[in-house]
Amino acid sequence: MHPAYSVIFFTTSSGAGYGLLFWLSLAEILVPGLLDRWPALAALVLALMLISAGLLASTYHLGHPERALGALSQWRSSWLSREAVAAVATYIPAGLLGIIWIAGLPEGMVPVLAGLSATGAIATVFCTGMIYASLRTIRQWNRPDLPWIFLALAAATGGLLFALFAAFAGAGLQASLVSVMSLSVGAGVKLRYWSAIDAEKPRYSVEDALGVPGLTSVRSLDPPHDRPNFVMREMGYTVARKHVEKLRQFVLINLFAVPLALVLIGALSGWFIAAFSLAILMATLGVVVERWLLFAEAEHVSQLYY
């Protein structure tokens, strides 16, 4: 599949934002007061900015961005519509949290609103993953573990952002545990995914594509088109295997190994802010390449025809 940069930015930016919102909300439920009001508000604002920037970028991948609101009406059958509904719904409790912290209102409702925000973050990212996992035409995506990869990487990148805010609030050691856990889980599910798609055989053959599965050794005498068409450009992107291996190593090092090492260094040395800041920078590079690779490795069944 052709890697669309608007979708790459959408999934990485909003994923990190929802991850940050999830950890912030969870902290407000389990450890009230871990972050003071202003650090918590700053983290919430950044989370909503990342989410909003990602959602806005996603509209540029539509043929008619002005029709984006129409996606809200198809929630019964479309994971894209469910994602849109969940995203809009999540703004409500998250926005109310912000109002409470800005106005200094009583915080009796904070745990409830935090719980709804965390639930909305999980639901939205899960729906994003299901948009791709529901496509039977792409075997690398049509897998039950794909939404969990989106969730794990959102938790990992958002966890690093949360750790930085926690470090400013003097809770860097506690936040280090969050980052170590989320990065480790993210690395595990991603390695398992790569291993699975490499071992899996193609589900369809050229004979299936032509509608004559009983035949064998079918080959094309002439190309179906004398120049690339839209389907070939969008669905026929390929990347050499040697480049795939190098890019996977880049992801493992920059998204998981280096941030994990930096988090541990920060926890042992006490230099939380510097270590977490550098870890965020490296993880950003890693997750962008990971998402580009997710698209570049995807093989659309339509290419059997070409």
Image: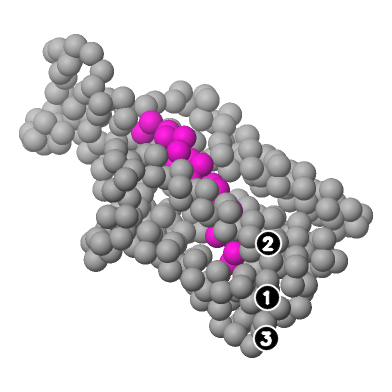
Marks 1 and 2, how far apart in space? Answer: 16 Å
Question: To which quarter of the image does residue 105 belong?
Answer: bottom right
Residue 192 seen in the figure: no
Name the quadrant of the N terminus: top left
- Main secondary-structure element of the magenta-colored stretch: helix
Three-letter residue code for mark 2: Ala
Residue at the (71%, 42%) spot, across then down: 281
Residue 1 seen in the figure: yes
Three-letter residue code for mark 1: Ala
Marks 3 and 1, how far apart in space? Answer: 9 Å
The residue identified by callout 2 is 43
The disc, 2 or 3, on the residue closer to the chain's N-terminal end is 2
Residue at the (13%, 28%) spot, across then down: 216
Q: Tell me if residue 70 comes above or below residue 239 in the rendering.
A: below
Question: To which quarter of the image does residue 7 belong?
Answer: top left
Marks 2 and 3, how far apart in space? Answer: 19 Å
The residue identified by callout 3 is 106
Residue at the (52%, 73%) spot, across then down: 93
Residue 211, disc = none
Instruction: Using residue 275 as the reference point, say whether residue 106 is left or right of it.
Output: left
Name the quadrant of the C terminus: top left
Around disc 3, counting alpha carbons within 10 Å, would you say few (fewer than 14), some (14 to 19), or many (20 or more)? few
Query: Which of pointers 2 and 3 indicates the residue nearer the eye?
Result: 3
Callout 2: SS = helix
In reply to whether residue 128 is colored magenta, the answer given is no
Q: Residue reaching furthest right? A: 269
